[in-house]
Image (tube, grey):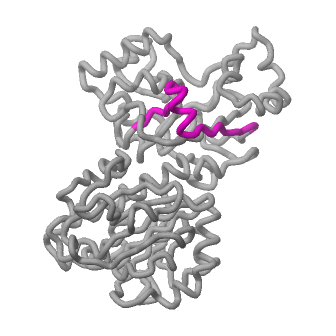
Amino acid sequence: MAVVGYYSMTTGEGLASQVDEITNNGDTAVNVTIPNAAQLASLDSLYVVNPSNGNFGAEYMANLGDITAAVNGGMNLIIFDRYVTNAQTILPGGSGITAVRDFTSGSDVNVAAGAPAAFTNGPNGVINDATFDGGNSSNHGYVTLASLPPGAVPLLTTSNPSHIVAFTFPVGAGNVFYSTIPLDYYTGANDANITPGEIFSLFGNTQAILCFTRGALIDTAAGAVPVEGLKVGDAIAVAKGGFERIKWICSTKLGGAALRRLPKLRPVCITAGALGDGLPKRDLWVSRQHRMLIRSAVAERMFGTKTALIAAIKLTALPGIFVDEAVEGVEYFHILFDSHEVIWAEGAPSESLYTGPEALKSVPVEARDELLCVFPELASPRFVGASAAYIPSGKFQRKLVAQHVRTAEPIFAQGAVPAF
């Protein structure tokens, strides 16, 4: 669950009509009265609307330095803007964009080529070329494709694919989402052609792609924390009950060139709800060999235990789970405890790094010496770590998944493990 602040440039505080799309996504809504460092400090995202057709809010502009610092520190900034003119002045990291206020294609919004699947088909429903069409000026202009900041991902366009209605781009440890759709108008139920369900899809799917960029949310003693925000000593909720502290953590970054050269390093995307019982809560990306905990009657019939750890690549035979060929980069995190554990990522039970000689193969070379200092026993080829749950052979993992495909039973049945 993310903490989302909501704010209107014209009122100097949030609008009541902004709350539904936040809470509908299962997040906590916080009314921001001044977007300064003190109020931004506790937010995962700041959701801003600009209802003015003639300017940007003076209070917002006065606090732009604090907003920029918060984004660089990891906050997401989500802006729906009517004015559009000179939008580069309100976007951290967006000073080079060319924004045009224009109503020529004002009632036409299309999905951009290459928009992430998590945006077009996310936890709050499908977005397609007809979704926002027919509203009263569904967009108030566009940003030119050629002027988008480095790393930007176009999401929505006008009828002209080079006229970008909505896009997202990274800034420091955070992200910025900008849209020329006057969402304040539609959340106020001023046009029946844009339904609440469509608004929930737009906002919820936007939240989903931003959270992926920042990393999977992990359940800790302090609540859900992005994986990149974890550190040695943090107390993490574990399936066996209680909490265990991280003993070692590192990450591996792979850019687009590396993924094209080594396609087997591409991540597996487990879309929201694909495991069953509403899990994961949001789309989750993991490495191919990363194992997820499943719980099913099929597993009990096959192995004599309801729970088992199954590699993500074996799960791709199931609907909603696939190797993501579209990502242009990925960062894998390796977390070790004193023993192998099952933890929660986006609400779904998922393994920590399984110790043993094979573990070293997934860890960056430069981090192995550090890992061996913490766990010297891993250097021994005879070391065998105890697993947190039963791990079938690859052959039986495939048979288990094939049986679930035939029966259409969820691979994670309700009431698997206690929640924290």
With respect to residue 111, does 78 lie above or below? Answer: below
Quadrant in the picture for residue 26 = bottom left
Asked whether, in this view, residue 404 is left or right of residue 307, the answer is left
- Verify whether residue 135 appears in magenta: no
Q: Nearer the viewer, residue 121 or 159?
A: 159
With respect to residue 218, does 159 lie above or below? Answer: below
What is the magenta range?
A: 247-270
With respect to residue 290, does 348 lie above or below? Answer: below
Residue 176 visible in the current orientation: yes
Tell me the residue at 35%/36% (across/down): 274
Q: Nearer the viewer, residue 404 or 192?
A: 192
Quadrant in the picture for residue 55 = bottom left
Tell me the residue at 33%/79% (across/down): 101
Asked whether, in this view, residue 399 is left or right of residue 160, the answer is right
Residue lying farthest to the front in this orientation: 146
Tell me the residue at 63%/51% (across/down): 221
Where is residue 270 drawn, in percent x and y?
A: 41, 36
- Verify whether residue 262 appears in magenta: yes
Where is residue 168 drawn, in percent x and y?
A: 45, 60
Residue 3 visible in the current orientation: no
Tell me the residue at 63%/77% (across/down): 66
Asked whether, in this view, residue 143 is left or right of residue 405, the answer is right
**Across the whole image, how many numbered discs are drawn on residues?**
0
Where is residue 129 drawn, in percent x and y?
A: 21, 56
Q: Nearer the viewer, residue 153 or 251?
A: 153
Where is residue 241 drawn, in percent x and y?
A: 59, 37
